[in-house]
Amino acid sequence: MCRPPRWSSRASKSSPKNRDTQVIKLTTNHGVITLDLNAEKAPKTVANFLAYVEAGHYNNTVFHRVIKNFMIQGGGFDTGMNQKKTNPTIENEAANGLKNKRGTVAMARTGDPHSATAQFFINTVDNDFLDFKSPSGQGWGYCVFGEVSEGMDVVDKIRAVRTANKGFHQDVPVEDVIIEKAEIV
């Protein structure tokens, strides 16, 4: 199902007039997911994500953490569960008014609110407990920087895969869910 983004007008790589919305196509072994990124609300986060896309970082990585009624997370490991090298961490822009609703994409991070690098997740349900509340402790939340505009059916297929523990990792798909290619469209 195709729907227009909830923010700004749609722009593409070939449309320099409005760069507030960048469109990313994730080709996975389960189908295609299209993301509309919101550079107006999360400029540093979108620039960071685009840099990883342009560098080919996400190609042949896996969704390594899948929790059915929570989210699917990827961008950090290859198919052998080897962690990929990343760029420096970025500032958490979660105070941008965007919410962790079903179908939104946000940056994953450690307990340090400003520790996001390449890993991201797609919310499979509304996760308001991940939203920004205050700039302290647990209140920082997780920065939403885009949403799925097409391919939510693919996200739903991925969220339903069988998972298990793999080494020190939990909720890892038993069969690899691969991001074969990430590209700007």
Image (cartoon, rainbow, N blue to C red):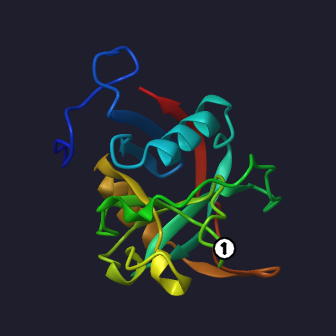
Residue 178 at x, y percent in the picture: 61, 52
Above-or-below relation of 146 to 163: above
Residue at (79, 52) in percent of width and height: 84
183 horizontally vs 77: left or right: left
Above-or-below relation of 38 to 53: below
Residue at (38, 44) in percent of width and height: 35
Residue at (83, 59) in percent of width and height: 82
The residue singled out by tag 1 in the image is 110
Where is the C terminus found, in terms of image quarters?
top left
130 horizontally vs 28: left or right: left
Residue 23 at x, y percent in the picture: 37, 34
The residue lying toward the viewer, choosing from 96 and 145, is 96
Crowd tier of the residue under label 1, counting other residues whose Cα lies within 10 Å: few below 14, some 14–19, many 20 or above = few
The residue lying toward the viewer, choosing from 4 and 46, is 46
The residue type indicated by label 1 comes to: Thr
Residue 17 at x, y percent in the picture: 28, 16
